[in-house]
Amino acid sequence: MVLPSFEFLLSSAAAGAALALLSMGVTLTYMTTRVSNFAHATMAITGAVTTLILLDRIFAGFRDSPLYYGLFIVAPIVAALVVGALAVIMYLVAIRPLIRKGTSLIGLMIATLAFDIILNNLLTVVLQLTPAQTVGRLLEANVKGYLVAIYVPLVGYIYPHRLLLPLIALLVAVGLHLFLTRTPFGISMRASIENPQLAKIIGIDIERIYVVSWFLSGATAGMAGSLLAFEMPGISPAAAYLYIVSIFAGSIVGGINSIYGALAGGFLVGSMEAIVPVMLSDLYQLLTGSYVDILRYQRMFSFLLLILVLLVAPEGLAGIKWRGIRRG
Amino acid sequence: MVELSALLIEIGNVITFVTVVLALNLMAGYAGIPNFGMAIFVYTGAFVVGALSVRFALLLLAALEPAALEALLGKPAYKPYVGDMSLVEIALFKSMEPTINRSLIPELSAVLSQKALVAVAVLLFTFLVATVLGVFVGVISSYAAVRLKEDYLAIALLAFSEMMVQVFFAQTDSVAGGRYAVYAPNVWPSELSSIAAALPPAVKPELKIGLLLAIALALVTYLYAERIANSPMGRALRAMRDDEFALSTYGRDIPAMRLRVMMLGGAITALAGVVYAMSFQPVIKATDYTRLTWTFIPWAMMIVGGMANNLGVVLGAVVIYVGRKVLEFSLPELFDLLRSVGIGPEGAAVDVLRAVAPNIFVGVIILLMLYLRPKGLLEERPGRTLGGRLRDLMEKFSR
Amino acid sequence: MGQVDLENPILRVRGVSKYFGKLKALDNVDLDVPRGAVTLLIGPNGSGKTTLVNVISGVLQPDGGRVEFEGRDITGLPPHERFKLGIVRSYQIPRLFPSLSVLENVLIGRDGNPGEGMVSGIFRGLWEGHELKATEDALAKLKFLGLLEVAEKKTSELSGGQLKLLEMARSTMSLRPKLILLDEPIAGVLPSLAHEILALVRKMSIELGITFLVVEHRLDIAAQYADYAYALHLGSIVAKGTPQEVMTNPKLVEIYIGD
């Protein structure tokens, strides 16, 4: 492969889109409540597990009918609602009481790690205890088996669901932009991010805004996780431990105080993680004739990018001039 | 005897955690550096034992006892794996190959026990290199973020640890065994082993030596941490944790201070990893050094015991470790009890729940402690740099 | 009041500007702080006084202009290196270390303690002498400021006025201070104590040759202790001269009446 195929670019774009959504979610709750949420990757995995359960319990019965494709519509929505609710619960039960007690930044971070451990272990139980442990196998046997490639002239075979991730990410980005700039609630949300004291004085219900930001963060994580379920080679809660590195890398590369920056940073990190190792492997093969699997080091690229940004421009892509969502 | 050994290994584990938590407390409790990458420091020590000390021992044999090396590495059974490589090449590049490593290590241990000089050299090498590497990892893991806010530091440290574990995991044979384990050699000369063997209790001498080492390391670390806590440095560290910005306007170089703490904490943690891998977990696998076990649990221990209180975090280490074990071993009986009234889990659920319950327990304990008793079981105390003399001074000025 | 030498100032601020978003906090500020004197910087709330102190102490980087200390350009220097050159500052809203005792807070103000090392810290003999001397000085300051009784308490147990005094004690602990920036040292302090504090500033300036830049909201109490004064309004210097000259400057009268 000297030139990347369309299919490969599409799957890389899907990976980038998923990470854009996830980095955006981490940035959102950081900007509103100043919490670095280390449970975010596990939330995405929760979305993936939700999708598997839907597939196992409901859609498996429609395998041979066109109704089956409803999964791609229903699953992201259900996952968004489930994980959004979960994020709100996390905020109300674990985070808000601590913020009100004046817990330090480090205390809040370790609280999200604690929540992460609890959720991750609960997911392990769910995955292993679903009847006859079908879910774990469902992924390899069913999901992959269910996916149908469509022939597109000039381009070749593509998996239509892969279009879905970039499309949904784009929709969410545009929707979020409109929400933040056109709706009264979104505008007061921006105001309270920029100046919480002032927002309180002019009567904005800041608590409600925090809850909504956690919901949006969780919902987008659930949606991304649901769509990633179709991309992943296998779903295990342990995957979250590594994935969180990429999510934060995207958030910091974009600039941790900018939602648009996070979308861009996440997309950059996610697609780069998919493209660069493969390109390097190919290059290596071209030069030496032997094959080396660089893909297994893919998280290293996001880490290196993260370090580079921390060293050179800690404010990230959003930088100093174009800060956060002040525009518009 | 098996029971006793198992118990002593558990005790060794607890003592390892005590050292790790004391080091974490220096970094996070006193200095406010949110080290969410502790796991990689512990693994650094284990890596030195599994991957570097073996190679060093083999190279030393190549220089001093070529015949012994020939007997170890020149086996026809290794041929398919090593081809025409020289013995030194095999030592460097193939000694971590799972098949070779498995049979090589017990034999190497036997050789070392007979060659006291080589064994002592390997021991010194192991501790020295682990210290240096611990310092090094402390610097590279935090260098990019020491100038920035704690959030960035936390993320950089966590990311570094997770990434490195993946890198070592992916090294399937050539570096450190990867997903296949490598084995830790016994590096005790027979003279030492026979002294240890003569002492009670009746368990393997290397376990006794390991326990003594672990206790010595934990004790030295504790004394060191207490000294620092009651020195001007302890005061400056706590001030840095409270408000690094204000401290920098009082002439303290915050990045340099953080780096120094990371270097020291890194070295201590790596040494704890050495003793742990040598004596209590001689099957070394990068993937065993998880964020859960070696980052999250030490954090839980510190928070439960009380940040910036050395005695507190020791207490926390014991409480959390014992709590997890008790839960793990009492769950089956609890399930039996529940089943007898018809609501207990059955089949596969039992094992799964038994595996996850101790982890969920730790997560819940952390959240509860943060909410109900954020200062931990034992609270932080002011530093006592002058001890009793402060009283005298206070009285002098009160007059 | 002594003569001030404006030809050869210890601190020279030239054309410093600082923006916060669209807000112009400092607009092309020139300021000379005469050596060995007490200089006042006055101005109403929001005039940019604290921003200027932040720029001088290195807490903020200016968007334009430069800061020179003893003829050396220090614009890009981080705060801890400016401290080492002899620039010490206090904070308007006391920025104390909440988990340290009052005495420990003051001791942080003393630099160069040989015991502040991860290795040297464990060798008591290396630092005990220094620590003993520092503690004696700290207790003497606390006694003068009436804080001796609370020396071993946490700062959270102190009143607002006591916090200001503690901030003052800490900022005068440095061994070789050349320029001390005091950000509103007497705000919220009883008038009698305010006079005592300013008298101490005066005394330190004369006896030890330390230069002070005292930021104040108003001029009245502080004027008699100062040699020179600047008035800042909306980020610009609007008046300068002896405190009397500044006090009677018509522009300033207008600003304060308009305030």
Image (cartoon, coloured by chain):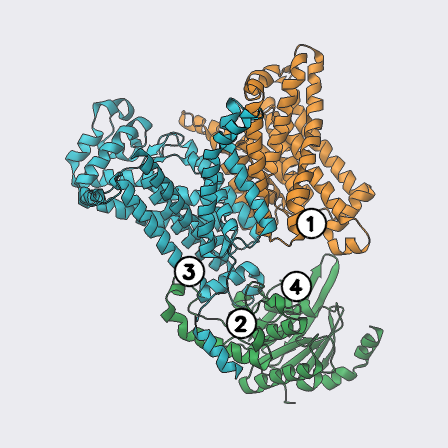
User: What tint does the image give chain A?
Assistant: orange
Q: Which residue is mark 1?
A: A323
Task: Indicate the secondary structure of the residue bearing disc 4.
Answer: strand
Residue B300 image position (x, y, % from top left):
51, 46
User: Are labels 2 and 1 on one chain?
Assistant: no
Determine the colour of chain B: cyan
Q: Quick check: A161 above or below B279?
A: above
Q: Left or right of C183: which side holds B396?
A: left
Could you give the CA–CA distance between mark 2 and mark 1, rounded to whole angstroms?
42 Å
Look at the numbered discs 4 and 2 and tell me whether their residues touch, using CB distance below 8 Å. Answer: no
Between B74 and B330, the one nearer to me in the picture: B330
The residue singled out by tag 2 in the image is C103
Please state which of residues B223 and A192 is positioned toward the viewer in this rendering.
Answer: B223
Q: How dense is the environment of label 3, judged by Cα within 10 Å: few (below 14), some, or many (20 and up)? A: many
Dot 1: chain letter: A
**Which residue is painted at 52% across and 58% down in the image?**
B379
Check disc 4: other Cα within 10 Å, few if <14, some if 14-19, many if 20+: some
The residue singled out by tag 3 in the image is B226
Please tell me if label 4 and label 2 are on a single chain.
Answer: yes
Category of crowding for the residue at label 1, using alpha-carbon neighbours closer than 10 angstroms: few (below 14), some (14–19), many (at least 20): some
Q: Can you name the residue that lies furthest to the front here?
A: B341
Q: Quadrant of residue A230?
A: top right
Q: CA distance from mark 1 to mark 4?
A: 20 Å
Residue that label 4 marks: C64
Q: Please say if C127 is above or below A273.
A: below
The disc labelled 3 sits on which kind of residue?
Glu
Closer to viewer: mark 4 or mark 2: 2
State the residue at coordinates (27%, 26%).
Answer: B82
Q: Which chain is green?
A: C
In the displayed structure, does residue C24 sit left or right of residue B23? right
Q: Is residue C3 visible?
A: yes
Query: Between tags 1 and 4, which lies in front?
Result: 1
